[in-house]
Image (cartoon, coloured by chain):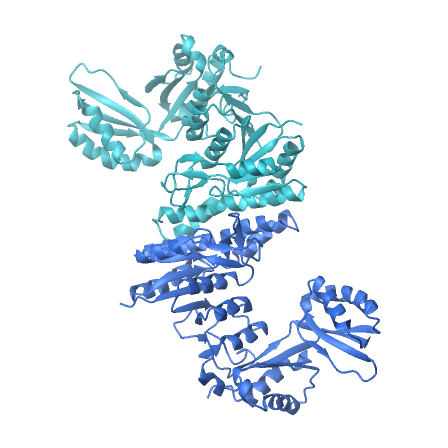
Chain colours: A cyan, B blue
Amino acid sequence: MSNSLIVQKYGGSSVANTERIKAVAKRVAGYSRRGHNLVVVVSALGDTTDDLLKLAGEITSAPNERELDMLISTGEQVSMALLAMALHKMGIDAISFTGAQVGILTDGSHTKAKIVDVSADRIRRELKKKKVVIVAGFQGIDPEHEITTLGRGGSDITAVALAKTLNAEVCEIYTDVEGVYTADPRVVKDAKKLSRISYEEMLELASLGAQVMQARSMEVAKKFSVPLHIRSSFTNKEGTIISKEVKAMEDVLVSGVTANRGEAKVTICSVPDRPGVAAVIFKRLAQSNINVDMIIQNISRTGYTDVSFTVPVAELARTKQVMNQIVKAVKAKGSIYNSDIAKISIVGVGMRSHSGVAAKLFDALASKKINVDMISTSEIKISCVINKKYSDKAVQAIHKAFDLGKK
Amino acid sequence: MSNSLIVQKYGGSSVANTERIKAVAKRVAGYSRRGHNLVVVVSALGDTTDDLLKLAGEITSAPNERELDMLISTGEQVSMALLAMALHKMGIDAISFTGAQVGILTDGSHTKAKIVDVSADRIRRELKKKKVVIVAGFQGIDPEHEITTLGRGGSDITAVALAKTLNAEVCEIYTDVEGVYTADPRVVKDAKKLSRISYEEMLELASLGAQVMQARSMEVAKKFSVPLHIRSSFTNKEGTIISKEVKAMEDVLVSGVTANRGEAKVTICSVPDRPGVAAVIFKRLAQSNINVDMIIQNISRTGYTDVSFTVPVAELARTKQVMNQIVKAVKAKGSIYNSDIAKISIVGVGMRSHSGVAAKLFDALASKKINVDMISTSEIKISCVINKKYSDKAVQAIHKAFDLGKK
C-alpha cells in the first residue's frame, strides 16, 4: 500500500449533475482503494455559479461584493457534500469542508481574493484517520472571518495551494479535455497531446487562450514547483504533466501553436516621439482597468511614431472612450481600431537554444500568403497578429511546418 | 427616533423568489427608516431545501447527516445574501451572516441540533454601526466547527434565540397566514383572527396541527418570555401577538378549535391488567421511534382491559409491525386499527377557572349526533376523537357553541 498524497481537482463540468458526481466518486474510490491518500477539491455543479449570479442580477445590477461571495460560495458547498455522500455510498470514508473550515486564509478582496496562508491542520487530522478529504474550491476566509472567493480559476488555485501545503506528490486537474495539445484539435486534425510540458510553456499557452487552466494558478504551481497533471474526468487516459523544465524538453523546438481571436488592435497615429509619451498612454489605460496585451512601437525617423497595442475585444468600447482623452493628451493625430484580428503564437522552451524558429514561422505564413501585422517575442514564445479570417489556415500551416502532428 | 430592536423572521414562502425578496426588503427598509434596529432571520428560498434534498436523494437513500447539513445550510446563505443586496439597492446599509459567523452555537446532533449558546457579538457590533443585520436561519455551528442545522421550524428557533439574546422588543414571525385563528378559516366561515394568545395556548394549538409555528420554537419563546408576533408578509395588518398569560386572557373561555386528521387509532384488545403492562407497550413503541399521542386506558373489572392510543398516520405501517410483538409480549388478544379518525380539540387558558367547558363541548357534538370515541384532557385543552367524516361539522358546531366567531 502506497502512502502518497494526491490532490485532485474536479471542475464544474466534471460535477455537472449527480450522475457525474457518482462517476467522480467511482474514480476517487479507485484511488483510495489503491492506497492513496486523497484530497479532492471540487467546483460548483455545472451552471450553479451562473444561476446564482442570475438571481443576484434580478435584484441589482451592482451587487455588493461581500454579499456576492456569500452567495456564490454556496455552489461548491453543495457539490462537496454530494460527493461525500456518493463516496459513503461506495463504502469510502470521506468528509467535506468549506474553505473556511480548512483554513484557506485569504486577503479581504472579495470576488478576487488572494490566498495568504493555508493551515490545513484539519485536513491532516482527517487524512490520518484514512478519510478522503473533500474541500470546496474557489473560496476562503479573510482575517475578519468573512467568506471570500478567489475569482476565475479559483478552484485550481485552491488545489495547487493545498498540494503545496500538504506536499502532495501530484496535483491532478480533471477537466473536459484530455490534456494540452500541440494545437486546438478542432482546427488541426492531427494535433497531438503533449505528455509533458514546462510551467513556462503552459503559462504562455494559458495566456494565449488555451484555457485548460488559468495563468494565475499556473504561476502558483510554478512558484512552489507543484507538479500538475491535466487530464479528463471522462477517460482513464494519462493527460499532460506540467512540471519544471527538464533537459529533454529543450530537444522539442516548439510545444504548441495557439490562436487567440479575442483581441482587438488599437493604433495611435503620429504620436510625437518624446520621452514619457508611452507612459502617459499606458498609465491612462491601466487606470481604466484595461488589460493591454501586445505593445508595438517602431523607431521613428520623422519625430512621429505609431503606437499599436491589443486589448480584449470586450474592453474595446471602454478603450475607445479613454483613447479620445489620450490622443489629446499626447497630441497624436488620431486612433484606429481593428477587431478583425487573430494572434497566432508558438511556444516552446527549445526556442531558447535554437535559432531560426522565427524564420520558420514567417516562412510558413508566407507560403500561405498570410500577411503579418504585428510581431512580438519573448524568450519562449513568438506571437504575430494576422487577419482573423486566416487564423485556422495559419495554425495548420505552422503546425505542419514544425512537424508537431502525430507520427 | 426609536431605538427599539426588532427581530423579524421571514419563512420560505416570504422569500420564494427575487420578487418576494424585494418585497421583504421594502418592508425591512420601512422599519429601518422609522428608526428601528433590525435583525432579520431568513429561511431558504421557497423549495430550495427540497431541491437540495432531491439531489442528495439522487446520490443515496441514506445520506450522512453531517454532509446533509453541509448541503442544506447553503439554502439560507443564498437568501440572506440576496436580501442584503436588495436592501443595498434601496440605500439601506445591511450585512448578512451565516449561523457560524454570528455564533449560533449548537450541540453536534446534525439535522436536529439544539442551540446551546448564542454569542451575537458580531451582530451587536454591526447594529451599533446602524446596519440591518441579516442572519441565516435554521443553522449553527457545533464545538468542532461543524455546520449544523436545527431541524423543522429551525429558522423560528434562530429568530427566537436571537430575540432573547439581544433582548428584542418583539420577535415578528412573517408567514403566509395573517395570524392565529379561532378555527381553520377554510372550515369555519366566520373564524376570527386572535389578536393575542398565551404561549401555553399556542403550544397546544401548534401540537394540534395549527402549523403556523413549530411547538419547539414556541417552547423556547415561552421559556425566555420572548413576545412573538405572527403575521403575514403579504399585508400590513397586525397579526397575533403571543405572550405570557395576562389576566384578561382568562375571560376568554376558549381561544380556538382545531381538527387533526393526521392520526390513526390503535387498540390492543383484552390486555391482562397487571402492573408494568403499559410500560412494556409504550417502551417498545418508543424504541421504534413511534410518536404516540393520546393514550386511553379504562379501568378493568374483569382483569382484562383495552388500551388505545393514537399515532401519526405516516407511522401506522411501522406501528403494525411492532404491535405483533407487543401483543405477544403482553399476552393480549389482538389489535385493531382505525385511520378514519379526527382529533377535535379546544384550547383556552380560561378553562382553568371555568367549569362546564367539557359539558358544552360534548353537548355541541351530541346536538350534531357525532359520537365521541376517545377523550383526553389537559389543563387548557380538551381533545376528543371522532369519525373523520364529521370533522368539519364538529369544528363548526363547537366554534358556534363557544361563540368564537366574528361579531
Q: With B394 as the anchor, is B239 left or right in this view? A: left
The residue positioned 38% from the left and 45% from the top of the image is: A144
The residue positioned 31% from the left and 29% from the top of the image is: A292
The residue positioned 43% from the left and 34% from the top of the image is: A117
Camera-side residue of A229 and B118? B118
The C terminus of chain A - image quarter: top right
Confirm whether residue A66 shows in the render.
yes
Corner quadrant of residue B347: bottom right
Camera-side residue of B262 and B154? B154
Residue B321 location, x and y as percent? 77, 64
Camera-side residue of A273 and A352? A352
Q: With A284 as the anchor, is B104 left or right in this view? A: right
Q: With A238 as the anchor, is B272 left or right in this view? A: right
Camera-side residue of A215 and B364? B364
Confirm whether residue A12 shows in the render.
no
Q: With A371 as the anchor, is B404 left or right in this view? A: right
